[in-house]
Image (tube, rainbow, N blue to C red):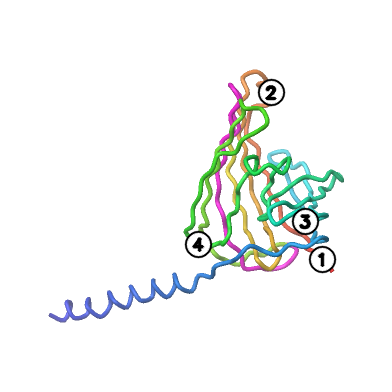
């Protein structure tokens, strides 16, 4: 009898704790970007340790779902309104690695197209955690997103595993890891696996 009564007390308490924890998880709306927002990253490509630094700067907001971003090379490319790479400004070409509003447990999948109809990339993503992340730019509360992409073009295959920490305070991600495996029968020297790890060193919001 004692055990039964204890179970009647403990089980509802556990359920309440789970419900409170789920309720406590915040939901993040899409950031409001502005011309001049700038992100600077330090990265390394493994296994050889080659530096892979990058910068991204908002230079134009053409419309709510089209941002023009300057890369470290000076080239200007297109991103969608959630800062997903979207070459040519074509919605079907976007690689959707983040989808707002952000909430732990959300999942999505999509198919990305290319000007060459023989090339297709599938994308799957999930928000798996809300947690603090410390990088050279500081410590931020972030949503950890895990995604996979699979690109094919004939015999060529390129599979990637993405882990990114998106942080509302800096409008984009503070840290990322990309595992890329390429199978290229026509160019076997290109086949293999590489890992890119990058962290934010500075975020400069528009003035």
How packed mark 3 is, by other alpha carbons closer than 10 Å (few <14, some 14-19, many 20 or more), is some
Q: Which tag, 2 or 3, sits closer to the chain's start?
A: 3
Q: Nearer the viewer, mark 2 or mark 1?
A: 1
Which residue is rendered at x = 65% and y = 64% of the image?
Answer: 167
Distance from the alpha carbon under mark 4 to that under mark 3 = 29 Å
- Picture layout, residue 15 above or below residue 61: below
Q: Position of residue 95 (x, y in %)?
A: 63, 44
C-alpha distance separating marks 3 and 1: 13 Å
How crowded pointer 4 is (Cα within 10 Å; few <14, some 14-19, many 20+) is rated as some
Residue occupied by mark 3: 61
CB under 8 Å between discs 1 and 4 = no
Q: Quadrant of residue 156?
A: top right
Q: Give, as a single range, the part of the protein colored magenta.
A: 136-158
Q: How far apart are the two marked residues, 1 and 4, measured between alpha carbons?
A: 29 Å
Q: Nearer the viewer, residue 198 or 120?
A: 120
Pair 1/4: label in front: 1
**Residue 133 picture quarter:** bottom right
Task: Decide whether residue 153 is among the magenta residues.
Answer: yes
Sequence order check, earlier mark of 2 and 1: 2
Q: Which residue is mark 1?
A: 206
- Residue 29 screen position, x and y as percent: 60, 65
Q: Are marks 3 and 1 in contact (CB under 8 Å)?
A: no
Can you identify the residue that label 2 sits on? 189
Label 4 vs label 2, nearer the camera: 4
Residue 128: x %, y % from top left:
51, 57
The x and y percentages for residue 28 are: 58, 66
Residue identified by numbered label 4? 104
Assign the C terminus to one quadrant of the image. Answer: bottom right
């Amino acid at each position: 009898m004692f055990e039964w009564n204890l179970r009647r007390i403990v089980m509802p308490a556990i359920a309440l704790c789970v419900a409170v924890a789920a309720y406590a998880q915040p939901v993040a709306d899409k950031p409001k970007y502005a011309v001049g927002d700038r992100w600077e990253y330090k990265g390394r490509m493994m296994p050889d340790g080659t530096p892979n630094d990058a910068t991204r700067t908002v230079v134009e907001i053409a419309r709510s779902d089209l941002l023009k971003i300057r890369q470290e090379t000076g080239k200007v490319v297109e991103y969608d309104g959630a800062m997903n790479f979207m070459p040519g400004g074509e919605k079907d070409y976007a690689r959707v690695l983040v989808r707002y509003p952000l909430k732990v447990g959300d999942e999505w999948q999509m198919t990305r197209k290319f000007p060459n109809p023989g090339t297709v990339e599938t994308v799957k993503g999930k928000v798996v955690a809300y947690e603090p992340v410390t990088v050279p730019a500081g410590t931020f509360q972030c949503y950890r997103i895990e995604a996979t992409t699979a690109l094919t073009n004939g015999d060529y295959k390129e599979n990637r595993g993405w882990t990114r920490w998106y942080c509302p305070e800096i409008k984009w991600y503070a840290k990322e890891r990309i595992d890329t495996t390429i199978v290229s029968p026509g160019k076997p020297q290109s086949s293999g696996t590489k890992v890119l790890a990058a962290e934010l060193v500075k975020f400069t919001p528009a003035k």
